[in-house]
Image (cartoon, helix red, strand yellow):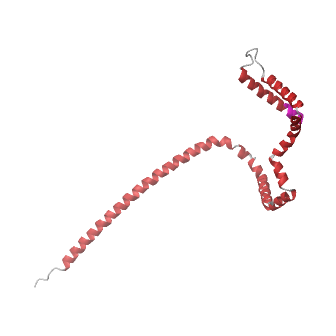
């Protein structure tokens, strides 16, 4: 499995390298004397290896690269700074929260058959119908707003008319009261 993954990585790197070469030197049918980048990189690697083999300090440095990589790992500090007992205490302190999350995940898992039902799977098929119904709903809302505005105008006219009629009836009542008062106060002939 690891060999297959490594082979896939090598093929991916070769593809990327060929893409870089194509960008630098042009298409595969480019100039005949063009050097390949891979050849240049191999020569540089060999030269660095020769230099490194002659220098004792560089040999030691190459041996220490694995340690440097280990020390640069962000989890290395966590392993060094936080002992296992403290990690266990962190986990135990979070136990209620973890159990609550487990319960929620189990609930989601129990509801999974509803998500896999034929009704949910058929939902995309109903999208056009839903869009049409949405348009009808929007039109009906607009019509409802227009009817509401019309009713509001009619109520305002009704209220205005009722007010005018009330004022008219009050004036007629006052006139009638004045006439009745004038009729009752007539002086009696002597």
The spot of residue 28 in percent (x, y) is: 75, 18
Count how many numbered circles sit on residues in the image.
0
Q: Check residue 66 for magenta coloring.
A: no
Magenta segment main secondary structure? helix
Relative to 110, say whether 166 is above or below: below
Q: Nearer the viewer, residue 151 or 187?
A: 151
Q: Which residues are magenta?
A: 1-7
**Residue 1 seen from this side:** no
Specify the farthest residue to the bottom: 190
**Residue occupying image coordinates x 86% and y 38%:** 61
Q: Nearer the viewer, residue 101 or 77?
A: 77
Query: Which percent across, then down, holds residue 86?
Result: 84, 59
Q: Quadrant of residue 39?
A: top right
Quadrant showing the C terminus: bottom left
> Residue 149: horizontal and vertical position, in percent?
44, 53
Q: Nearer the viewer, residue 83 or 149?
A: 83
Residue 189 seen from this side:
yes
Measured as percent of width and height from the top left, residue 84 is found at 87, 56
Vertical comparison of 69 with 154: above or below: above
The answer to whether 102 is drawn above or below residue 190 in the figure is above
Q: Where does the N terminus fall, quadrant-wise?
A: top right
């Amino acid at each position: 499995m690891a060999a297959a993954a490594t082979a896939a990585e090598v093929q991916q790197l070769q593809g990327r390298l060929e893409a870089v070469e194509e960008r630098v030197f042009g298409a595969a049918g480019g100039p005949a004397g063009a050097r390949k980048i891979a050849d240049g990189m191999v020569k540089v690697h060999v030269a660095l290896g020769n230099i490194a083999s002659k220098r004792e300090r560089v040999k030691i440095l190459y041996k220490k690269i694995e340690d440097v990589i280990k020390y640069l790992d962000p989890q290395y500090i966590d392993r060094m700074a936080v002992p296992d007992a403290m990690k266990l205490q962190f986990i135990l302190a979070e136990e209620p929260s973890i159990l609550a999350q487990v319960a929620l995940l189990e609930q989601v898992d129990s509801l999974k058959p509803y998500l896999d039902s034929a009704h949910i799977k058929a939902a995309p098929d109903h999208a056009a119908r839903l869009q049409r119904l949405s348009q009808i709903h929007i039109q009906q809302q607009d019509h409802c707003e227009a009817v509401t505005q019309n009713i509001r105008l009619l109520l305002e006219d009704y209220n205005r008319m009722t007010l005018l009629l009330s004022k008219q009836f009050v004036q007629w009542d006052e006139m009638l009261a004045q006439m009745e008062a004038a009729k009752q106060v007539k002086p009696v002939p002597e």
